[in-house]
Amino acid sequence: MDGRRHSVDIPISKTLVQLRRVRSLRDPDTNSMSKYSALVENVNWETNSNNDISVQFMNSFQGGSDKHRSFRSKNPGLYGLGGDCIDDFELDCALGKSRFILHENSEWIGSTGSRLVRSKQAEEFDFSGSDKEDVYGNKSLSDRHCGSQMDKGLALTRVNPLEDGDYEAAGRSLHLERTDQIASKRQSQRKNNVNSSREVGNFCKVCSPCRSASDALSSHSASLFVNEEADAIDHNRPSCEVNCCWSRTPRFRGANSPFNVDEFPLLYKNADESALYEQKSLKHIGNERSPYPRSLSQKFRPKSFNELVGQNVVARSLLGAISRGRIASFYLFHGPRGTGKTSAARIFAAALNCLSHEEHRPCGLCCECVLYFSGRSGDIKEVDSVRINRRDRVRSLIKNAAIPPLSSRFKVLIIDECHLMHGETWATVLNSIDNLSQHVVFVMITPDVNELPRSAVSRSQRFHFPKVKDADIASRLGRICVKEGLEFDQGAVDFVASKSNGSLRDAEMVLDQLSLLGKKVTMGLAYELIGVISDDELLGLLDMALSSDTSNTVIKARELMRSRVDPMQLISQLANLVMDILAGKCQDNVSEVRKKFCSRHTSEADLQKLTFALRIFSETEKQLRVSKNQTTWLTAALLQLSSVESSSSDGNGTKLCFRTDSFKNLATCSCKLNTPDKLRMQKDSDGKLEAVWKRATDLCLSNSLKNFLKKQGKLSSLLLGQGLAIAELEFCHPDYVSKAEKSWKIIANSLQSICGCNVEIRINLVPCASDSKYAKVKKSSLRLFSCSRRMQQKSQSSTKRGTDSDYSEYTSEKPMLSDQPTLPCSSECSYQMPNNCSDRMVVVSTLRNSEGNILSTRTASSHRSFEDDMSKIPGLVVDSSKEEGSNHEFHVLSFEEPEHQPNCFPRTLRLQKKFRSSNASHTTCCTKQHNKTASSSLSKTSFGTCLVGNDSYVFCSGACNNTDSCINENVLKKNSAMLCWRTPCFTRERY
Ligand SMILES: Nc1ncnc2c1ncn2[C@@H]1O[C@H](COP(=O)(O)OP(=O)(O)OP(=O)(O)O)[C@@H](O)[C@H]1O
Ligand SMILES: [Zn+2]
């Protein structure tokens, strides 16, 4: 406020001051003020008793969003349309005499054409006067504004950021200059056949797209087409150049195009010339290739197929299509995020219209390329997939698409995130694709093709963008570092690449952040930024764990997890490290600590230990995915490393066996037990079970529970399998059984921390010989992790279905392992036959991959149409087989692409199931969300369950045709189905 004041008297409403409050400033998208608040907050409005209004724009003001927005004040005198920057405002108002005071530090900048003139002088401009009486006249406001502007010789324009070194300041500010001071410059413009009023219009058009293009810079998706609404508004407005002047709506229609194509040759002689013209065009329009990109990712967005990393097949195929002239009308680009789909779509669009005859298109030099890359192509549009969900919008899109291209060969419509389009929108688009002219090309982009309607997918030319290889990412990052003048450790770049999960954008983002942390991209910085710990620290931890340094291992593990890294990350880092060591990666480019570690662990026994450690880590990683108490699991895993020494004896002499192969393959068991029987430990002749039980009970915090378990309970058997132990407990009184049942979590936790893996508990009632009262009570068994509680009867063994080796039934009355079936490697098999197994019964087993995802769900059903019905589920593959000597059919349900299971399966079925185990019965309920078609087809099928991730899904049929209650207690009872499956530990609450 101290500086000299430039004040302008302009006919402006006093109500301008109320800008802060006008509703019409709200963002039409979100109805919130937030998008404009930056603007409003950065303008100081002051009034005085004379109606004077002082407006001060802060230099620091920066517009925020890239989206087009328009607003209109309630006040008749104030009319605004534009973006978030003051140069997008249309201040076209005249209500009484007001003074418009500009402070010196607001740096209004006037310019003509591309030349900037900065005026530091304090001046006053009087806008009142002859215009005043026209305030409510029929004359358009804009005309008045224009007139007053011309009368008073005032030009307002935007600073061209390209000419001003200070983008932030100049690009966001305005400069005001007396026309008489710039008359000479105008004169020169007139020479270029631009008349004065036209010129205002021109510079207006120059302004707004420039803003829009710099917005485009901040968001790749700056759409050239999404502003249909705004276009419509503009359409109805009086065609005044000043209107255009202050409007930011990009007008890329040919007729309105500010860009005189004739000014530009068809093909430039060389890149320099192209750049020159491009600069020239930038002055008018702005460009996505602004010298001020916001991130490395934007700066290095590929602009030709050559620059596209790791997508050679796609690039070759698209180029081939162009050179052979075989252009389809509908392309679908899908694949993980940040792999170059959008970039490829843009390159492809440009290449389609490129005028060059060279093999490698787009050339970037021809007129079409320049038009497109400068954001002014009228024929290549990016469509907002959400906005076209409105019926009128999609129709107008199609209508526009039907109009032949303006100058180019193809009209290309790029629809990113097309999975967000509604079914109706899809239908409209698909119906019209065939009818549209040969010149229309749709390029749809989505990360997940399974989310699209089948009909759409099958009509498209699909291009899958796989994850980019780590090596490709690393070399790209290296090149970026060189171009940016950044020093870097190759190891750090490799590390960032390995952590980016195949997404080049993610990697570039991390590099961007790293570049802000210092001049050199180092391992340490990378570790710290990504939240992982260094190799040296890991080796320290591993060393402690392997050398039985229990307390330090626990302390260190806790410290690491508390401070920086999450257990999943830590375990996977440990596993990777061990793998590296086993693979002999100890020579080059490794730290001293690692070299020392490697030199200390060279013997065969050491390597075996490490191999075993790796197995434990991989098992633990699976468990961590489903565990709530990850820290404990991880610590337990680390402590196991020392307990796997050759004899695998722990301090109490209890043998803990950890197997990594199937039950059958016991020869490889590291605890050197060669036959399954040795695992049974049912007789407990050497008191090992007793010792385990004692330790488990000692771990219980509650004394009363501890005493109760010690006194009344007994561990009758313990089977340790792959990632799972089965513990059978015995109690001699039903009350004890129910008491134990109530504390199942605590018991399970204690046993889990001893065994280091999931533990399934069965609680059996074994009446004491002396207790004649309960002598006849049948044994009960509670499967805590199967959500079922069932009474065991001798006769039940008759329900065991054949000898199918892929199914196992663990009952307390059968020897646990004597004829233990083989479980498929890494499988979780769970099923249970009810006492009176009916034909409708379906049993389920699930196969998981090493990631813990379900690979297949196996069901057995007698229903013939099961397979047919299941085949309607997208992506689901059903293999059926019939069990010998029985009516049961088996169906293996699997997914074409396992990585998509968690999405596509629930999405189709939309069934949620809740299971509660109450006494001996099940209550099941299901929400009503399921997809009607899927469920009605399912309702005619059989009954089964499937686990996807941690969620259970139930298919059922037969007696139940009501989709809403297809899974209910009745069905279960009717079919006598007792559903039972083993869910990962700690997830029981989910049900
Ligand atoms: N294959 C690639 N080659 C070169 N750069 C890439 C590649 N993939 C991603 N990038 C970088 O990541 C940025 C984003 O890429 P792009 O938008 O094309 O990815 P996308 O697959 O469309 O991602 P999304 O699915 O999230 O939209 C680009 O600006 C570029 O810097
Ligand atoms: Zn070209």
Image (tube, rainbow, N blue to C red):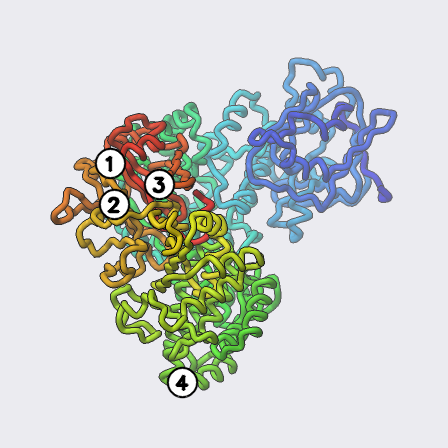
Label 1 vs 4, first from the N-terminus: 4
Which amino acid type is marked by label 4? Thr
**Res 477 seen here:** no
Near-viewer residue (367 or 336): 336
Q: Quadrant of residue 523?
A: bottom right
Task: Mark 2 and mark 1 in contact? Answer it, CB < 8 Å.
Answer: yes
CA separation in Å, label 3 and label 4: 49 Å
Place of residue 380 in the rendered image (x, y in percent of width and height, measured from the top left): 40, 39
Residue drawn 23% across the image and 47% down it: 795
> Mark 3, residues whose alpha carbon is within 10 Å: few (<14), some, or many (≥20)?
many
Q: Name the residue that disc number 2 marks.
A: 859
Label 3 vs 1, first from the N-terminus: 1
Under tag 2, what secondary structure? strand
Label 2 vs 1, first from the N-terminus: 2
Q: Name the residue that disc number 4 marks.
A: 602
Place of residue 974 in the rendered image (x, y in percent of width and height, measured from the top left): 28, 32
Residue drawn 37% across the image and 45% down it: 788
Which amino acid type is marked by label 3? Tyr
Relative to residue 409, is residue 526 depicted above or below? below
> Mark 2, residues whose alpha carbon is within 10 Å: few (<14), some, or many (≥20)?
many
Near-viewer residue (459 or 710): 710
**Res 959 seen here:** yes
> Mark 1, residues whose alpha carbon is within 10 Å: few (<14), some, or many (≥20)?
many
Relative to residue 728, is residue 245 depicted above or below? above
Relative to residue 129, is residue 467 depicted above or below? below
Task: Mark 2 and mark 4 in contact? Answer it, CB < 8 Å.
Answer: no
Q: Which mark is residue 953?
A: 3
Which amino acid type is marked by label 2? Thr
Q: Name the residue that disc number 1 marks.
A: 942
Under tag 1, what secondary structure? loop
> Mark 4, residues whose alpha carbon is within 10 Å: few (<14), some, or many (≥20)?
few
Under tag 3, what secondary structure? strand
